[in-house]
Amino acid sequence: MAFGNFNFDLTAGLQEIGDRFTQLRDELENTIEETIRSERFGVLPETEGEAAMDAAALRALVRTLRETLAVRERQLERKGGEAAEMAAVTAALQRKNEELAQSRDGEAVAEIQREFETKLAAAERKVYALTKERDALRRGSEKLSSIDDLVREKDAIIQQVMEEGEVLSKKQLALEQTVKKLRWQVRELQAETKDLAASLEGERAKAASAVSERAATAGELYSIREQHAAELAAERQHYERLLEEEREARAAAEGKAAEAARVGVTRRLKEAEARVESLEGMLAELRAELERQRAAADEREELLSGEVTDLQRRCAEAEARQQEAAARIPEATSALMRQLESMQAAASEQAAAWTEAERSLHARLRAAEATAGSSAGQAAHLGRELEEARQQLAAATEQLSAVRAALTDAQQAVEVERQRRATAETTAGHLRSDLASAQDSLNTLEKVYAQQIESLQAREASALSCVRTLEGKLKSAIGSNGSAGDAPPALAAPGYKWVLVKEGQEAAAVVGAGGSSAWLSRQASSAGVSTADESAEPAEDESVKVGGSLLWGASSGRPSGGGGGGAPSGRPRDQQVAALQQQVRELEATRERLSEELVRAATEAAAGQAARAAAAAADARLREAEERLAAAVELLGEKEELLEEAQTDMVEMREHYRQQIDFMATQLTAGQQPPPA
């Protein structure tokens, strides 16, 4: 409601500001127009009256008026813009006020509802507390009324006894003192019995609640211990599974490195990437699970801390109630003492004969003794209840010892887990050393493969050069065979060599220039090609053009018998061509083999790099697993600290309850003892 009034006042104020701004804008426009009008029409009569003013002064006056008008117009435009901005701001503020009013109304209603619910709950609690206090006061008033009735009855009896006689005044005084002492003791015992019964009931309820809370706490501790044991077992299995996976990954990497020389690595690379992605997903899931476990552990810790705080608060309230009960006992005793003193004064002032009332006094004395006996029975009953409370405390102590034994078992399990962690760390060290050795072997293999690749590349280059040379020779031989003319020479002897000579050149010169002509036959019989033969080829094959025609001449190491000692044929040339083709095919096969070896070496190098990457990934996963293990051990240590704190709190609670029970037993014993005469 207050917020609605504030919103209405703010809206009205904004409207008033807008109206005032509009009024000021109108007044400013009117003032500017009047000023311009007065300046214009106030100057014109002067100009008409002064005909002698020159044109320059008139132009200056017009310029001044125009500047003034421009300044006023700019001021007017600026004021108009400010007015528009103010109007926009006003509209925005109004919209915002409406939105705030709507939201604030809902929030105010919700807040008022929550406030009244809180007040209603507090009032209900107060009513409940006041009802309890009313019942307690009603019981106290009933007790006081019964005591007042008893006192009035005793006063009447005393009056009757004092009226009956004064003869036995001394005896009456002695008996009266005895009766007063007994009455005082009886009343004191009754009051103490009632107080002790009430306090015992309260303490019994507190002890029962504490025992139930302790049992619940013990159950929670047992469940927490079981949960921690299950978590430790799951983590142990998880880490063992990770180690097995690391071993399998290492074995797979070694197998991949061994099989990389025979098969392609594309498929394995894809499988490794898929496996890495799956392992990363698994790792993310494990991290999320660990975070959830940590959050759950934090929630349990907060819950246990809240319960411990609640128990401490209840203990403090019990101590306060106990102190209050102890403080109230002397006040009730002082009231009874004042009443007894007043009774003694009245009895001393109104001493009378007790002869006829002696029998009634004896009867009342026996009744008082019976009441004292019943009080003693009640005290014995209270003693039995106290013994039961002690037995319950002993049972709680046994439960606490069982909890301690469970904690000891949990600590032993933690020690076992620590030993397993040390074993896992040792295994991880072995795995690291194995990974290092595997990486060294991979580096060595890479170096060897690099050297092999370089040598294979050199061999391939040399083979390619040889192939090119032989192809050139083959082309030249085929070309020479094709350009021999219509009448090729006859088949020559096996030792002859075909050369091209000039027209009219002598055969002897050709024979002298031929030198060694059997190199082609030697090349056909051999598998390799030497560099010396390659360098000698241009010198041994010569062709000279004479008059545009080529002539074939035969040269041999043996002397020829004239010009046609033997008709040479084309069979040796065909054999040489076939030998050259065979050598070319062999060189091509060698080149293909070298290419395959190069591809295989590159494949092995890629496989080695993939194995190295897999080893690095396995090492990273191993380090991450070690970090998770360290975090789990740290979390386990924190949980152990919480268990120790809970154990300490339980010990303190047990001591506190033991002190309360000892105090109650002391009070009961003091109430059973008779006061000194």
Image: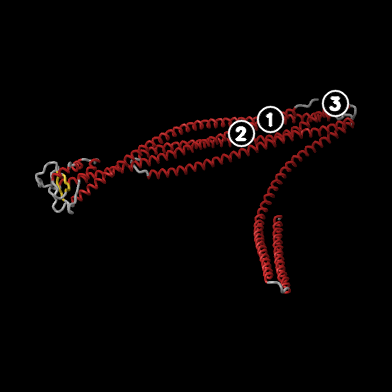
Of 596 and 292, which appears nearest the observer?
596
Could you say where residue 591 lies in the image, as x and y percent from the top left?
28, 44
Residue on which disc 2 sits: 645
Q: Mark 3 or mark 1, which has the lower sequence index?
A: 3
Q: CA distance from mark 3 to mark 1?
A: 42 Å
Secondary element under disc 3, as helix, strand or loop, is helix
**For residue 655, above or below residue 620:** above
Residue 174 visible within the image: yes
Secondary element under disc 1, as helix, strand or loop, is helix
Secondary element under disc 2, as helix, strand or loop, is helix
Per the rendering, the mark at residue 659 is 1
Structural crowding at the residue carrying mark 1, measured as other residues with C-alpha within 10 Å and reported as few (<14), some (14–19) or many (≥20): few
Q: Mark 2 or mark 3, which has the lower sequence index?
A: 3
Residue on which disc 3 sits: 174
**Dot 2 and dot 1 residues touching (CB under 8 Å):** no
Query: Which of label 2 and label 3 is nearer to you?
Result: 2
**For residue 474, above or below residue 147:** below
Q: Quadrant of the C terminus?
A: top right
Q: Amino acid at mark 2?
A: Glu
